[in-house]
Amino acid sequence: MSRRQIKTRAEDYSRWYQDVIAAADMAEHAPVRGCMIIKPWGYGIWERLQRELDDRFKETGHENAYFPLLVPKSLITKEEEHVEGFAPECAIVTHGGDKELEEPLYIRPTSEAIICSTYAKWINSWRDLPILINQWANVVRWEMRPRLFLRTLEFLWQEGHTAHETHDEAAEEVRRMLDVYADVAESVMAVPVIKGSKTASERFPGAIDTTCIEAMMQDGKALQAGTSHDLGQNFAKAYDIEFQGRDGEMQHAWSTSWGVSTRLIGAIIMTHGDDDGIVVPPMLAPQQAVVVPIFKGEEQAAEMCADAEAIVADLRAAGVRAKADTRDHLRPGAKFFEWEKKGVPVRVEYGARDKASGNAVIKRRDTGEKMIVPLTEVASTIAGLMTTIQAGMLAKARAWRDERTFVCDDYDDFKSRVGDGGFFHMRWCGEAACETRVKDDTKATIRCIPYEGDDDPGACTICGADATGIRPIFARAY
RNA sequence: CGGGGCGUAGCUCAGCCUGGCAGAGCGCUUGCUUCGGGAGCAAGAGGCCGGAGGUUCGAAUCCUCUCGCCCCGACCA
């Protein structure tokens, strides 16, 4: 029957993840450990995602710019916490041509250093603020355990860097961009997320507040899908971003930074994929519909392929990204499997039988549902399906997550269950000691303290001391 | 960095223990037949057996060194 190339999720989740990427032809390992070659199907998804993000950045008043890859060591080391946080994972260039450099150059692990030091030159007056800039870039972090898309040494991302006159403005920016991320995650990627703040121990090095969106993967583990940082005046002080205020006094600017990366593709895979491959949400699918003509012999091939192209033209006119798979060295079944592994939202089958009846067969990737539709209605049906599927995927993912989200008041119960995955809302006294204890006991961490929820004061589930506010989410994470 | 495993065809691997012509499946090329869920047959192409050194008449196989990768643990978008 079917020749399975993909381990099932139940057999080996981690293997499934890798198999799915290979089967969908999205990416492969590069010669350098931890580096990734992103192939057209994977990159196509990234391009769609970039566009959705970039449009929203522009709508919220940001402009794109580009800062260099190489950063002098002296600049990197200015912000103390920042250095400590990133130094262990920096790649450093020591030679230029055949000469050893006098000052080593860091390959950016993130661009606060180069951007903030530049802002210092750009900003003199309160009239120069705010500065709202984003850049699309690659960064390098020498990670120990790479995984395609989720954690690679080099990855693609965007990083927004803004500077403001007041802390209120900066804080507003931090939340505005977090909202943008949450919107893209849910309405574009169909990945439900929870917005919240990190605890001190999980904060970006140098930030006073790190906000994040957290998603739950199908194995119940959490994935940080985006972050937006309130940097306070820490970087302004380290990099001398000073301006003369409305009152004539010199003061330090308030800065923010925020980013999402190609990791989001990993989130899509682990949120929507099934044992047959990935399932790409319609808004991100490089092809939303593929028409497979079915034919016998050369004459019929020409005829059915022409008809298939006509269906594609209808689909495009209806705003659907579509193509016909007219390759003649593959039989229809092989094509069906190929596009299924790639996660194309809808497949159209069209052969002599359909031609005779004036219909086409439509198959949904997300539900597997097959329907027979009159030719004249194929384009409009599929155009409608795009929104149906998109919404269905989000609803399904949300239901999955909610089923694995628990309110827990018994630490022993938590310890015995957290290994199976899921989000656990427990009361927390706010002490780092309790976080550490949870991590030592279970490898789980506080993923975030959500913004939405009810204050629920009581006893800290871990130590029994007083706990106030919204319950944090404890979970194992990627 | 600790523990474990692996480097042989594009891919997955067998062969190694016990030294003696370089192998299989998949993929690829060509042809014919096929074509509504991963096609069949036939003929082909494809190799510095990770690298270096050693033992030997002879090394993919034995020995030494080296490089690289994968998996499991300590860091992370």
Image (spheres, rainbow, N blue to C red):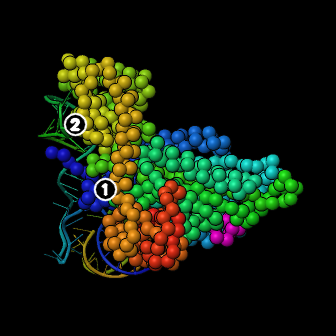
Residue ranking furthest to the right: A248
Foreground tag (1 vs 2): 1
Q: Position of residue A403 (x, y in %)?
A: 33, 56
Mark-to-mark CA distance, 1 and 2: 23 Å
Asked whether the viewer can see residue A66, the reply is no
A227 over A414 or under it: above or below? above
- The residue depicted at 55 percent of the width and 48 percent of the height is A179
A341 over B77 or under it: above or below? above
> Looking at the picture, do discs 1 and 2 lie on one chain?
yes
- Is A184 colored magenta in this rendering? no
As drawn, the label of residue A16 is 1
Which secondary structure lies at badge 2?
A: helix
Q: For the C terminus of chain A, which image quadrant?
A: bottom left
**What's the chain of the residue with tag 1?**
A
* Residue situated in front as seen by the camera: B9 or A285: A285
- The residue depicted at 44 percent of the width and 55 percent of the height is A215
Q: Main secondary structure of the magenta part?
A: helix
Q: Quadrant of residue B38 in the image? A: top left
Which secondary structure lies at badge 1?
A: helix
Q: Tell me which numbered mark, 1 or 2, is placed earlier along the sequence.
A: 1
Asked whether the viewer can see residue A372, the reply is yes
Type of amino acid under label 1: Trp
* Residue situated in front as seen by the camera: A343 or B52: A343
A19 over A462 or under it: above or below? above
Q: Which residues are magenta?
A: A72-82
Query: Neighbour class for label 1 at 10 Å: few (<14), some, many (≥20)?
Result: many
Q: Is residue A265 left or right of residue A327?
A: right
Residue hosting label 2: A333
Query: Neighbour class for label 2 at 10 Å: few (<14), some, many (≥20)?
Result: few
**What's the chain of the residue with tag 2?**
A
